[in-house]
Amino acid sequence: MAILTQEQAKQIIDKVLSYAKADETEVNISGGKTGNIRYARNTVNTSGESNEINLNITSVYGKKSGSATINELDDESLKRAVSRSEEIAQLAPENPEYMPMLGPQKYAESRTFAEATDKINPEYRAKAAIDSIQPSKEKDLTAAGYLEDYSGFSAMGNSKGMFGYNKRTSVDFSVTVRTADGTGSGYAIRDFNDAALLDTKNVTNIAMQKAMASTSAQAIEPGKYTVILEPTAASDLLRLISRSMDARSADEGRSFLSKKGGGTRLGEKLFDERVNIYSDPTHPDIPSSPWTNEGLPREKTKWIENGVVKNMYYSRYWAELKGVEPIASPSGIIIEGGDQSLADMIKSTERGVLVTRFWYIRAVDPQTLLYTGLTRDGTFYIENGQIKFPVKNFRFNESPIIMLNNIEALGKAERVSGSMIPAMKIRDFTFTSLSDAV
Amino acid sequence: MKRRDFIQLSSLGFGAMMTPGLMMMGNTVSAEQLLQPGLANAAKKVLADIALNAAKSKGATYTDVRIGRYLQQFLFTREKNVQNISNAESFGVGIRVIADGTWGFSATSDVTPDGIKACAETAVAIAKANAKLQIEPVILAPVKGFGEVSWATPITKNAFEIPVKDKIDLLLKVNNSAMDNGAAFVTSNLFMVNEQKYFASTDGSYIDQDIHRIWPTFTVTAIDKAEGKFRTRQSLSAPMGMGYEYLDGLASEKMAGPAGLISYRNSYDMVEDAIAASKHANEKLTAKSVAPGKYDLVLDPDHLGLTIHESVGHPLELDRVLGYEANYAGTSFATLDKWKTKDFKYGSDLVNIVADKVQPFSLGLTGYDDEGVKCKEWDLIKNGVLVNYQAIRDQAKIIDESESHGCCYADNWNSVQFQRMPNVSLRPGKDKLSVQDMIKGVEKGIYIVGRGSYSIDQQRYNFQFGGQLFYEIKNGEIVGMLEDVAYQSNTQEFWNSCAQICDQDDYRLFGTFFDGKGQPSQVSAVSHGSSTTRFNGVNVINTGRRI
């Protein structure tokens, strides 16, 4: 039984702390069950399930820290791990940036656990795969997909009285459907905490439609285009901003948020005023862990408000150095949407490209957040308010900073990979070359 | 953190911002524990036989067992601080069977007779359950049993035996040297891996292997506060299939290149490179922004390795070609019908690309792969023509091979083994040619060194690569440094524009330590050798932007 209750976890943590002799001790326990099924060429290749429990002890003497991990929770193993962790700490070099452990914290209640996901078993996974393979086969299409589920817990406690406990489930599903002649390809991806919301047949149907609609793509010239990004495509690029909002990098002069002459661009209007980005661990559609690795509570935080940079995240060390409160980095972000449907956006477009997915996105220049990558699995030309024909894939070189200044319209935000991202229409998006890939 | 999260993290491209300590597999232990001997071979053989017999009694027609102890030591520093020292040990057994013509796999950390027996039975049960959905029964290319054999990476200094303090002292010296020479920031890391693997199969092999790999690396950042500009330069080291001797910095392994650059063959001087990197990072702040257009590119092995990896290594993985990776990494343009024509021109006549897992000092170097096949070398591209793929035992028949190529790998005991890229290298030119002489023949070109940004489509046609250092070549001479450079091309077009390859004296290895593939994602380490090579008329774009 890998999922411990809050009481069981607390009891073990307290026991470990009672064995500890170091100046400070922190205990993390996490465990759970994860399973997966993978299929390709309309047949299942691999499937598996594993249970794991880990207990990690971090011991600190002054500014020297060490840690040890074990998988056994009997008293003898716990005692041995405590002394090993303490030995390692005493031998470790000092870390001048070490911050004393936090005392008791108040963590938000986040509804990250769902019974339906916890109950997933091999039969469920096999059926999920068959529900995806069967309809593809019937239309002479080839499906390749992957489902991974997780149900587990994490608990954290330290010698200063801090304690947190969270149970979490997740299910991630993605499928690629290709036509038999290899000229069409479609993709769909969904992730939920609650598996009751997942229907692999419906999701596969979206990928099938895209595969069939994308055959015989025509080449159009690369250049600047108005693009309509489905939420999956928008998410691929825009989630990258949230990883670059670290205050320390900005203060050090090595971030897009660093200012000419020194200082940061906090408070500056860098984006279109319709841009509002925030994070919230208790958001009902994307509940996430209420604390960070440092034990900092994650709270609802506005990052961009009406186009203005409102917050950057501060580690505890950097916050103390700068005399400000620490701000936890987000786990998922919410980009506020607008009222337009995808159909509205297409209807109002004279000439543009509908992008359903981006692929192989890599940073080109961290100074400007310039990224390169390609469109994949269904790209379409729009003319006079209608989808005219599928087009060959493009390589792009573009910065999400520039994109969020070129907004034409926003759709309703949807969950994609743990974030809430709207479909969006962006003008002057830079495609730099063509790809023959399908 | 799940393993695939690390792969995403490491591929962000912002080396300076890599989060330390989030990429370990297994339990955190002391450095001393990494030196403890594992289970004796005699005991492993007894356990392996339990698995082989248990699986057979449940109906398996083939079984292999991998008892693995995977050790890692990763060190992270920035400027004067040690950020993290991580020692990890992961020990367990993975059992793979064929029953009813279908693969089944199960793994356990309970390395006891009972734990192993139960694990083998689970593997058979999974195979039988999956057999109901099977449409292509597994057929294995034959392999002879090797009996009880062993193999070890030929190291001279076991990195795990070097005191942690010595390693930290080296990294802090690297950081100090960089800061003394104009760096605003520096991070340096040392990654060391030891795989102690025992393989046994119903073919009659009991193979014990001890494999070592090492990767020293750093990123130096220079800042122009007034202009609000920053530039980085990463180390020009390569991850290697070597012990700590790679860090000896032997003068005999250094090569003086154009523009005052020092290249390293099989011995690396980390401090010297950090000093050069600080100067380069500062020079990049004021380098000329490139004028886009067609250039002849002169690509250093420490750069070209990544281009080989992405545009030749991956598209010639047979599982990709067949569609098994369609939902993740993608498929391949190098389809079987192109290969069957026997005259598909992948590149110009000069292009000879070879696959192997036997090259000295390489990351792919092992005696046997993870399904008990003896490793070897074979041609992928001969005189520009596509002649072969990378295939393992259950794929060999598809390309009319009588035996596996021996490139099956699992990144841990609890991961199922599958086809992974071997070393894929460009053979050096036959005629005597130095880099300096190659540059003399270029009228309008760019000399590119080091690995930068990289991106390629899901069938490996269209790619874009950056680099660490770019030098403008005009009328046969290097005239200065360039910035904002990336080149875009199409794989077949690019390799057919290959015009000159330097000789064996310039041959060096490039490597990647954390190549990702599969779902759930597994990492693997692979080297790519080449000599400096010229490609004519490649499209270069300017990546500078204003925000």
Image (cartoon, rainbow, N blue to C red):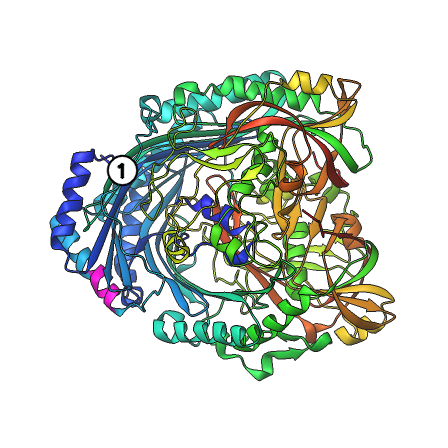
Q: Is residue B335 left or right of residue B90?
A: right
Give how far across and how far down residue A80 sits, in percent.
Answer: 16, 57
Q: Is residue B307 above or below residue B190?
A: above
- Subunit of label 1: A
Query: Is A185 on the left-hand or right-hand side of B101?
Result: right
For the residue pair B388 and A378, the one nearer the viewer reads as A378
Image location (x, y in percent) of residue B95:
36, 44
Q: Quadrant of residue A86?
A: bottom left
Q: Is residue B534 above or below residue A224?
A: below
Question: Which SS class for mark 1?
Answer: loop
Displayed quadrant of residue B51:
top left
Say whether residue B306 is magenta.
no
> Badge 1 local density, few (<14 within 10 Å), some, or many (20+)?
few
| Disc 1 residue type (three-letter) | Lys
Frontmost residue, A287 versus B171? A287
Image spot of residue A74 (x, y percent): 14, 47
**Residue segment shown in magenta:** A84-90
**Residue drawn at (64%, 44%), measured in percent from left and top?**
B400
- Frontmost residue, B364 versus A264: A264
Residue A88 in the magenta stretch? The answer is: yes
Q: Which image quarter holds the N terminus of chain B?
A: top left
According to the picture, the residue beneath numbered tag 1 turns out to be A106
